[in-house]
Amino acid sequence: MFFDGWSGLVRVLVVGVLAYIALVLLLRVSGKRTLSKMNAFDLVVTVALGSTLATVLLSESVALAEGIFALGLLVLLQFLITWASVRSPRIQALVKAEPSLLLHRGHFLHEAMRAQRVTEAEIRAALRAQGIGDVSSVEAVVLETDGTISAVPNSPDNGSSSLANVPKLTAVDETTPGPRTGRNTP
């Protein structure tokens, strides 16, 4: 129960070192994007890599060669999907979520916040973490595709360049005071 013998420990040591070296080499060859936190798909691949490595280390029924093959397959699939998503808007739409506008010109967009399950307290905490003390000094708060919350401070161009890929406001939230705009950006 606490100790089954030295052979299991030696196996974990040898297989662990070799599997770790193989994973590092695979990740170096595949590029930085493989372990990025760009979206939910990237997170799933990262978790799958960790789970596969753990299985290789701790399961005697999985040979080292099979484990390295599984790691390589996950890295290859991640590479192919990201390569294709950069080249195809359809694949990108399948793999990646759109950013969501949560606050616009100092006003919380409660409907969008409910849809994304984000509270005012979480938005205020994100603003404080970014050094912003006044909600009214913010042009927009965006829930990014990787789950982080970004704030765009008020600026002369209203942050239009950084908000270009955020879906525009089609209608202002009913609880949000302020004018409706016909601009392409919020």
Image: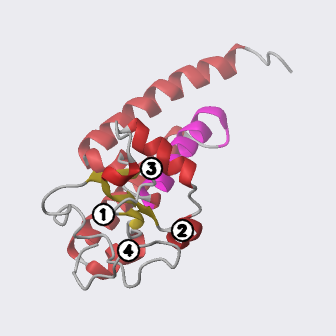
Lower position in the chain sequence, tag 3 or tag 1? 3
**Colouring used for the render:** secondary structure
Question: Which image quarter: residue 178?
Answer: bottom left
To which residue does mark 2 refer?
Answer: 110
Three-letter code, disc 1: Thr
To which residue does mark 1 refer?
Answer: 82
Kindly identify the residue that appears in the image at 22 percent across and 70 percent down.
Answer: 164
To which residue does mark 3 refer?
Answer: 69
Question: Which image quarter: residue 110?
Answer: bottom right
The residue nearer to you, when weighing 127 against 11, is 127
Lower position in the chain sequence, tag 2 or tag 4? 2
Q: Is residue 33 above or below residue 109?
A: above
Within 10 Å of disc 1 (Cα), the crowding (few <14, some 14-19, many 20+) is: some
Q: Nearer the viewer, mark 2 or mark 3?
A: 2
Three-letter code, disc 3: Phe
Lower position in the chain sequence, tag 3 or tag 4? 3
Three-letter code, disc 4: Gly
Marks 3 and 4 sit apart, C-alpha to C-alpha, by 57 Å
Counting from the top left corner in percent of width and height, residue 59 is at: 67, 38
Magenta stretch secondary structure, dominant: helix
To which residue does mark 4 refer?
Answer: 178
Kindly identify the residue that appears in the image at 29 percent across and 70 percent down.
Answer: 85
Q: Is residue 123 above or below residue 176?
A: above
Which stretch did the figure color magenta? 41-61
Within 10 Å of disc 2 (Cα), the crowding (few <14, some 14-19, many 20+) is: some
Marks 2 and 3 sit apart, C-alpha to C-alpha, by 47 Å
Give the SS element for disc 2: helix
Three-letter code, disc 2: His
Within 10 Å of disc 4 (Cα), the crowding (few <14, some 14-19, many 20+) is: few
